[in-house]
Image (tube, rainbow, N blue to C red):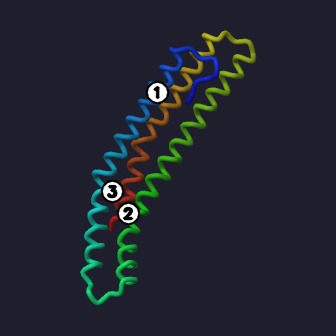
Amino acid sequence: MWAPARQGAAGVAMAELQQLRVQEAVDSMVKNLERENIRKMQGLMFRCSAGCCEDSQASMQQVHQCIERCHAPLAQAQALVTSELEKFQDRLARCTLHCNDKAKDSIDAGSKELQVKRQLECCVTKCVDDHMNLIPTMTKKMKESLSSMGK
């Protein structure tokens, strides 16, 4: 993903390691959000939907509309999480593309390949570190939004 065209095995391993670091942190965040927020909303949605089905006087269309209303907060929550993760991923990708551009410019300017690889590794590691530091704030923001949706 982040590796320039002429990168050795060590550079590929470094890029994969950095990618794994981010993936594990994001996976952990998503599991935490699911356990603490989304799951509660799912329970509310199912109980609400079951309540819609209890109304023997309602028409089929009314029951369907009731169920749709019950599902709306959960759908909104899932869309929020998806959107935030996409924005995070886009920002990280832009950062690593900038690193690749700098590496290519250095190669074009005649820098030694080993020096450029080290520069690229440092740049990508900084991107990952910076974005890892954004995860707690992003999590807090999503939790606050999800909490207000669940009410």
Instruction: Name which residue type carries label 2.
Output: Leu
- Percent x, y of residue 62: 38, 84
Separation of marks 1 and 2 at Cα, in angstroms: 32 Å
Callout 3 touching callout 2 (CB < 8 Å): yes
Q: Which residue is drawn at the image coordinates 49% and 31% (left, top)?
A: 128
Q: Which residue is mark 1?
A: 18
Q: Which residue is drawn at the image coordinates 61% and 27% (left, top)?
A: 99
Q: Is residue 36 shown above or below 96?
A: below
**Number of the label disc, if any, that sits on residue 38:** 3
> What element does badge 1 sit on?
helix
Image quadrant where residue 29 sits: top left
Please tell me which of labels 3 and 2 falls first in the chain: 3
- Percent x, y of residue 149: 38, 64
In this view, the residue farthest toward the bottom is 57
> What element does badge 3 sit on?
helix
Dot 3, crowdedness within 10 Å: few (<14), some or many (≥20)?
many
Q: Which residue is drawn at the image coordinates 40% and 40% (left, top)?
A: 26
Separation of marks 3 and 1 at Cα, in angstroms: 28 Å
Dot 2, crowdedness within 10 Å: few (<14), some or many (≥20)?
many
Please tell me which of labels 1 and 2 falls first in the chain: 1
> What element does badge 2 sit on?
helix
Q: Which residue is mark 2?
A: 74
